[in-house]
Image (tube, rainbow, N blue to C red):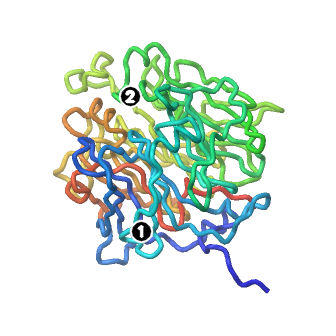
Amino acid sequence: MALWKPDPTFYASPRDAVSAPPEKLAYVAAFDRAAEKPDAIAVLDVDPGSASYGDVVGWTDLPYLGDELHHFGWNACSSALCPYAPHPHVERRYLIVPGLRSSRVYVIDTKDKPTAPEIIKVLEPDELAKRAGYSRPHTVHCGPEGLYLTALGGANGEDGPGGIALLDHTSFDVLGRWEVDRGPQYFAYDAWWHIAHDVLITSEWGTPSMIEDGVVGELLLGRKYGHSLHFWDLRKRRHVQEVDLGDEHQMVLELRPAHDPTKQYGFAGVVVSVEDLSASVWLWHRDGDRWAATKVITIPAEPADASRLPEVIAPFGAVPPLVTDIDLSVDDQWLYVSCWGTGELKRYDVSDPFHPVEAGSVRIGGIVGRTPHPAAPDLPLAGGPQMVEVSRDGKRVYVTNSLYGSWDDQFYPDGVGAWMAKLDSTADGFALDERFFPHGDAFRGRRPHQTRLQGGDASSDSYCYP
């Protein structure tokens, strides 16, 4: 009888993941806006019982300058247990780390030296361009038959379309473009799926020329950024349906499907409405034999003295929430919504996904508020809750403050700084952990962006069993 067991961090069901041991380390992408120092993966101690809790305890510099690390992911996760393409004996070992500006992709081994992960492979931009026709790799998802890598731009000087490249699980080579028939899809951003139903969903930001130097006011007010969701046949790799949220809803970014594989719904965050500067969260769901999207959360802009606002929003006399990330707990109960502009992290009870109920809010940073962390009450903070990551058991929520270099500079022209925070989340409360506040020099002059948790987290895994 075979005794070779699957990676213990692969969980057949969300229920199994929720009951798994807590994470001890967090990996954080940190980039140098000036491109004078290499970007890095910072390793943080997130074990409350450790003497170095909340400290950066490991660091891996990349070999080049100007990558601008952004989103990254694991090489394998719980989808390895899915029945139609199982590979249970791979390991959740490697971080797949794209450079959003450079179009390089790094493969970083965390197994033997978890606090000093080692780069074992670098995919150069020409391989992504030649094999898949893409540039500006953005988001990584571990799928049952390969690694899905979304990309914002086209290759060989083409601004678009963006799309998805597929990477081999073992060699990490680029296999090619995922799409067989992309239909009307042109803009790209995130991709996720209802894996048990063979449905893939993609969202829209913009092409490289639309985002790399900051928000282009004429394009925003002209309603030219992405405002649709796209639904695909996952197996056939064909576009099935576009759902337009309305061109006033600019930049449809993060996708968070229900973790329960029997459900076919999920949440999408919209950065801003050009009509009133509000932000919103939409629920996609089945409507008969078609897909539909319903706005379930609206977050209004907050009036502010124009003299306290950056040039990009001063004419409006208000601070837009700027919902730039959302995250759904593994038990599908809590949705966390980051309002990077106002410096607020909101928590909603989405047990009834059509009727979210706000169930907690924390302020830190913000364009006007500059709310300090309770661990340093005299230190005003720039930036705001941006990337959000939730532990498997849903009790810990991690946030970082940088969005994207050029956008940081537009909305926080006096400097965005660098900080990370952790919140404790229970049915009875939602509050910042005063013991956890790495900031400033802890990140060695870099800006922290996405966080991945050792053993997986709420936004890295998909499950095939209820």
Q: Look at the image and tell me whether residue 376 can be seen.
A: yes
Labels 2 and 1: the sequence-earlier one: 1
Q: Secondary structure at mark 2?
A: loop
Q: Nearer the viewer, mark 2 or mark 1?
A: 1
Q: Which residue is mark 1?
A: 25
Residue pictured at 33% horizontal, 52% vertical: 30
Is residue 81 depicted above or below 400 in this figure?
A: below
Residue found farthest to the left? 378
Q: Is residue 346 left or right of residue 170?
A: left
Is the Cβ of the residue at disc 2 closer than 8 Å to that at disc 1?
Answer: no
Crowd rating for badge 1 (residues with CA inside 10 Å; few <14, some 14–19, many 20+): many
Q: Nearer the viewer, residue 197 or 109?
A: 109
Q: Position of residue 254 (x, y in %)?
A: 53, 40
Residue 344 rendering spot, x and y as whole percentages: 38, 42
Query: What's under tag 1, amino acid-wise?
Result: Leu
SS category of the residue bearing label 1: strand
Residue at 44 percent of width and 19 percent of height: 276
Q: Residue at x 34, y 60 (%)?
A: 42
Q: Is residue 3 above or below residue 359?
A: below
Could you classify mark 2 by the number of other residues whose Cα lies within 10 Å: few (under 14), some (14-19), or many (20 or more)? many
From the viewer's perspective, is 316 left or right of 395?
left
Q: Which image quarter holds the C terminus?
A: bottom right
Specify whether 72 is left or right of 213.
Answer: right
Tell which of 202 and 304 is nearer to you.
202
Q: Which mark is residue 320?
A: 2
**Amino acid marked by disc 2:** Pro
- Give the image location of residue 292, x and y in percent: 71, 30
Q: Nearer the viewer, residue 42 or 351?
A: 42
On the picture, is 73 further left or further right than 61? right
Disc number at residue 113?
Answer: none
Quarter-wise, where is residue 85 in the image? bottom right
Query: Which quarter of the rendering shows the N terminus?
Result: bottom right
